[in-house]
Amino acid sequence: MSREEEDTDSLVENICMKMYAVGNEIMVAACDSELLGRTLEDGEITFKISKDFYYDVHGSIEMLEEHLQRATIANLVGERCVRCGVKMGLIMEENILIIDGVPHAQFALMI
C-alpha cells in the first residue's frame, strides 16, 4: 500500500469498534467495516466477526488509535485494524494470525 493510500484510509470511517470496560481493564474490539458479519473458515477454525461483539461505532483509523492508546486488551481483525496495532507497536508481525486470508491479532498489556 502506498503512503498516499494509507493517508486516505485515515480520513475514511471504515473501522467498526466496540469498547468494553471491566474493572481496570479496557478492551477494544475492532474490525475493518467490510468484514462485519462475515464468518471466516480455515481448516478447523471458524471465526465469526459478529456485530454484537465488534460494532458500537463506525470511525476512522485515528479514532481506533486514540482508543488503543488507553486499551489494556485488544482484539483486531482486518488489514487496517491490525496494521494500526503494528504501527503503534502493540502487535508484533510474527504474532499475526491469518484466518481465511484475513489478519487477526490480539494483545494484552501485563502490568
Image (cartoon, rainbow, N blue to C red):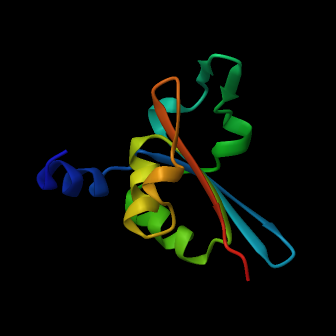
Classify residue 43 as left or right of residue 99.
Answer: right
Q: Is residue 13 left or right of residue 96?
A: left
Percent from the top left, x then y, of residue 81? Answer: 46, 50
Residue 111 pos. (x, y %): 73, 83
Apparent side of residue 4 relative to residue 51 in the rendered image (left or right): left
Q: Residue 58 versus residue 28: which sits nearer the camera?
A: 28
Question: Percent from the top left, x then y, of residue 91?
Answer: 50, 61
Q: Along the horizontal axis of the image, is 43 left or right of 102?
A: right
Which residue is located at x 22 percent, y 53 percent?
A: 6
Task: Give the residue displayed 30% in from the left and 57% down from the top.
Answer: 10
Q: Residue at x 14, y 49 (%)?
A: 2
> In this rendering, is residue 70 above or below 103?
below
Residue that protrudes farthest toward the front in the picture: 94
| Residue 98 picture location, percent across and down | 50, 34
For the image, the number of numbered tags is 0
Q: Quadrant of residue 1?
A: top left
Residue at 32% across, 50% down: 12
Identify the residue at the far right of this view. Answer: 23
| Direction bottom: furthest residue | 111
